[in-house]
Image (spheres, rainbow, N blue to C red):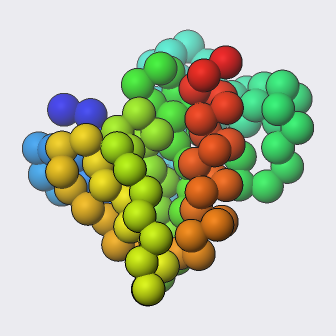
Amino acid sequence: MPTLYFEEREGGTVQVSAKGIKEYGFPVKKIFEELCLRELTTLEGRIDAVRKLYGYKYNVPVYVNEEMLFFKICGNKIHWLNFSQVASIIKTEHGTDFVFKDGTVLNTGANYRTSLRAYEKAATIHHR
């Protein structure tokens, strides 16, 4: 089952997929590095390529492959959402909700415009 999103926590990372929740005792960066290595590349190489191709300087989306393209959302917590699994984005009075293709809803508390911009960055990469 595809990953819906990762949530950064103190001392670890939580992975949420349609199958459930899995906790790791290390940062999300290490997970991204391992995912990139499976694609015969490095996280640093992916980030450098995206920066050079699209001119992004901050909050660069992490492209692993067609099914895994993660963009960062900072609200009440820090989340890395899988672009390919996001079905819709909803502006709420408390921030932004992301609805995933399986029906899961993530309430982020993040600014709507900032969230939309982060999503659009990932969309630009995905639709290249």
Q: The N terminus lies in which quarter of the figure?
A: top left
Check the image and name the residue furthest to the top: 40
Residue drawn at the location 48% of the way across and 54% of the way down: 80
**Is 80 displayed left or right of 97 in the figure?**
right
**Is 122 displayed left or right of 14 in the figure?**
right
Q: In this view, does 7 lie above or below 123?
A: below
Which residue occupies the foreground of this view, 92 or 111? 92
Q: The C terminus lies in which quarter of the figure?
A: top right
Q: In this view, does 1 lie above or below 97?
A: above
* Place of residue 58 in the rendered image (x, y in percent of width and height, measured from the top left): 79, 55
Q: In this view, does 13 lie above or below 124?
A: below
Residue drawn at the location 38% of the way across and 44% of the way down: 86
Which residue occupies the foreground of this view, 69 or 25? 69
Is residue 91 something that shows in the picture?
A: yes
Check the image and name the residue furthest to the left: 19
Check the image and name the residue furthest to the bottom: 94
**Residue 42 picture quarter:** top right
* Place of residue 50 in the rendered image (x, y in percent of width and height, measured from the top left): 76, 31
Residue drawn at the location 41% of the way across and 25% of the way down: 67
**Is 77 displayed left or right of 101 in the figure?**
right
* Place of residue 109 in the rendered image (x, y in percent of width and height, measured from the top left): 46, 80
Is residue 7 something that shows in the picture?
A: no
Q: Is residue 97 above or below residue 53?
A: below
* Place of residue 123 in the rendered image (x, y in percent of width and height, measured from the top left): 59, 35
The number of callouts visible is 0
**Is 81 displayed left or right of 87 in the figure?**
right
Residue drawn at the location 63% of the way across and 53% of the way down: 118
